[in-house]
Image (spheres, rainbow, N blue to C red):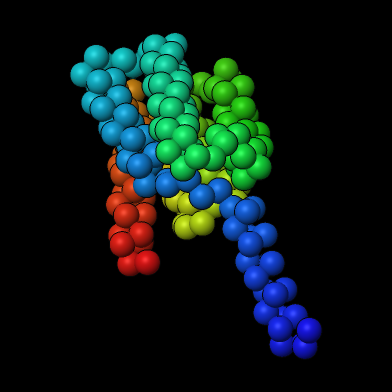
């Protein structure tokens, strides 16, 4: 085997190894689903006027649980349709990357002094989870993570300037966990169509 042929084979092996390391489930449908759930939940929370801290946390933890279950079922459906195992090595890597910030968000909610602080905390740590998981996925999910982190920091800055009405925290949750997910799903669709 000559040097050029060996180099070509080596490049093929590298490409296959990189593809095996990346999580390749279709993220656009998952992000769209999460965006719809986040948007509807924000509208529901606002209409129900859930402003107490325990009520807000219980409501949004329930929404989060529903979102995780719905995303799990959609990803499982994709895996079955592709004839692949759900719990693949890339899926394990992504899960291991996103779990620590999500667990921190869950635990630190107990010491958040109010709904806006919890909202900022969740946005920042969810953004950190997306950024960490982004190292194992194609696309710009790390940039989406940075948008969530920036939103969390923005809420903290606004809180330093004065108090914010508690009922409007649902609007912030909808903008972040609804609109940002929907915008990212649209971005992924356009990107898929180009390639």
Looking at the image, residue 69 sits to the left or right of residue 89; the answer is: left
What is the count of numbered marks? 0
Residue at left offset 75%, top offset 80%? 6
Residue at left offset 57%, top offset 17%? 110
| Relative vertical location of residue 108 with respect to residue 35 in this rendering, above or below | above
Give the image quarter of residue 67.
top left
Q: Nearer the viewer, residue 29 or 36?
A: 29
| Relative vertical location of residue 12 with respect to residue 124 in this rendering, above or below | below
Residue 40 image offset from top left, x and y in percent: 26, 27
Q: Nearer the viewer, residue 103 or 141?
A: 141
Residue 66 image offset from top left, x and y in percent: 41, 21
Q: Nearer the viewer, residue 29 or 175?
A: 29
Q: Is residue 168 visible?
A: no
| Relative vertical location of residue 191 with respect to residue 8 in this rendering, above or below | above
Residue at left offset 66%, top offset 42%? 89
Looking at the image, residue 93 sits to the left or right of residue 123; the answer is: right
| Quadrant the C terminus occupies | bottom left
Residue at left offset 43%, top offset 13%? 58
| Relative vertical location of residue 57 with respect to residue 181 in this rendering, above or below | above
Looking at the image, residue 104 sits to the left or right of residue 124; the answer is: right
| Quadrant the N terminus occupies | bottom right
Q: Is residue 50 visible?
A: yes
Residue 194 image offset from top left, x and y in percent: 33, 67
Residue 24 image offset from top left, x and y in percent: 51, 50
Give the image quarter of residue 179.
top left
Q: Residue furthest left?
A: 47
């Amino acid at each position: 085997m000559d040097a050029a042929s060996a180099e070509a084979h080596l490049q093929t092996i590298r490409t296959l190894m990189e593809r095996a390391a990346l999580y390749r489930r279709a993220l656009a449908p998952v992000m769209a689903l999460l965006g719809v759930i986040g948007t509807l939940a924000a509208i529901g929370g606002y209409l129900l006027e859930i402003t107490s801290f325990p009520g807000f946390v219980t409501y949004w933890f329930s929404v989060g649980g529903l979102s995780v279950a719905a995303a799990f079922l959609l990803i499982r459906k994709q895996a079955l349709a592709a004839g692949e195992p759900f719990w693949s090595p890339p899926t394990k890597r992504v899960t291991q990357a996103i779990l620590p910030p999500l667990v921190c968000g869950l635990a630190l909610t107990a010491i958040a002094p109010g709904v806006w602080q919890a909202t900022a905390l969740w946005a920042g740590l969810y953004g950190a989870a997306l950024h960490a998981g982004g190292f194992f996925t194609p696309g710009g999910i790390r940039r989406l993570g940075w948008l969530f982190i920036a939103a969390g920091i923005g809420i903290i800055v606004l809180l330093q300037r004065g108090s914010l009405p508690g009922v409007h925290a649902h609007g912030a949750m909808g903008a972040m966990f609804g609109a940002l997910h929907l915008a990212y799903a649209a971005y992924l669709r356009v990107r898929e169509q180009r390639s």
